[in-house]
Amino acid sequence: MIIFGKSDTGVRRPVNQDRFLIREFGDDLALCAVFDGMGGANGGEEASTAALRAFDRRITSEVLDAQNSGELITRTFAERLLCRAAEEANSEIFRQGASPELEGMGTTVIAAFILPEEVVALNIGDSRLYRADMGELKQISKDNSYVQYLIDMGRITKEEARTHPQKNIITKCLGTEETVEPDTYRTGDVPENLLLCSDGLSNALSEQFIYDVITDPDTSTEEKVNELIDAANEAGGPDNITVILVQND
C-alpha cells in the first residue's frame, strides 16, 4: 500500500484552510482524512486543525491500545471509532466557536479507515471519497450539500451541479451545531485506488480526467497527486486543493 497526500492553497485563496491526515499502523492498516475548514479569516484554519488533532489523537490512541492488547480491529471497531472521533472533534470546534472571533466556524471531514479486507469511511460535508478501478471513478461518499439535494430531487444533473451557483452550500459540517450525525460507508473490499479530496479538486476537474491520471501506469503515486493539483490550479484554482491517494498493489 502506497499513500501520498498534499495540500495547496490554490490560485485565488489567500490562505489554506484545508488539512489532511495520514496515519499508518502497519502494512495493511491506515487512517486517511481530509478536512476543509470554513468560517472567517481564522475560523476555517482553527476548525480544520482542531478536527485533525481530535481524529489523530482519538484514533491513534485506541488503535495502538488494541494492537498492544491483541484485539482484532474489525470493521465495526473502525466504524465506531471514526464516529467517536467525529463526536470529539465536533464538541471541540463547537466549544471554540463560542468565541466571538471564531463564531460560526466549522469544517468538513472525509475519513477512510483502511483495513486488510475493506475500507470503512465517514463523511460530514462535501469533501469526497472515490475509488478508481474496474474502468471508472466511483464516488463512495455522498455530499451533504444543497446541490446534492437538488440532484436527489431530480432537479439538476450531476454535471450541472459542478457549476451550480450554490454548489458551496453544505447542509452538514463539524462544529456548527452541538451534535452532528455522520454518514458512514463500507466498501466491501480494498479498492486498487482510493482518493480523498476537498471540493477544490472535485469542483475543478472532471471525473474522467481524475480517473485517467490516477490509473496511469507510468507515473508514481506522488506524481499523480501533483498532476491533479497542478491541473486544478490550471483550471482556475478557485479554492484550496487537498488530495490523498492510496494505491494498492
Image (spheres, helix red, strand yellow):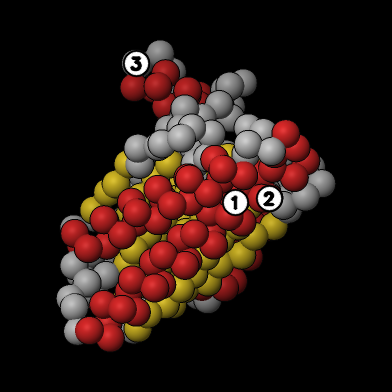
Above or below, 235 against 49 in this view is above
Above or below, 131 against 169 in this view is below
Q: Residues within 10 Å of mark 3 (few under 14, many from 20)?
A: few
Residue 165 is drawn in which quadrant? top right
Q: Separation of disc 1 and disc 2 at Cα?
A: 5 Å
Above or below, 215 against 177 in this view is below
User: Which residue appears at 18% of the width and 78% of the height?
Assistant: 71
User: Which residue appears at 46% of the width and 60% of the height?
Assistant: 55
The residue to which callout 2 is attached is: 45
- The circle drawn on residue 35 is none
Name the front one of labels 3 and 1. Answer: 1
In the shown orientation, is residue 180 left or right of residue 80?
A: right
Q: Residues within 10 Å of mark 1 (few under 14, many from 20)?
A: many
Identify the element where label 2 is drawn.
helix
Quarter of the image that includes the C terminus = bottom left
In percent of width and height, residue 213 lies at 51, 60
Depth check, front residue: 72 or 167: 72
Identify the element where label 3 is drawn.
loop
The residue to which callout 3 is attached is: 153
Of callouts 3 and 1, the N-terminal one? 1
**Callout 3, which amino acid?**
Met
In the shown orientation, is residue 113 left or right of residue 54?
A: left
The reply to whether discs 3 and 1 touch (Cβ–Cβ < 8 Å) is: no
Q: Residues within 10 Å of mark 2 (few under 14, many from 20)?
A: many
Above or below, 114 against 67 in this view is above
The reply to whether discs 1 and 2 touch (Cβ–Cβ < 8 Å) is: yes
Quarter of the image that includes the N terminus = bottom left
The residue to which callout 1 is attached is: 48
In the shown orientation, is residue 215 left or right of residue 63?
A: right
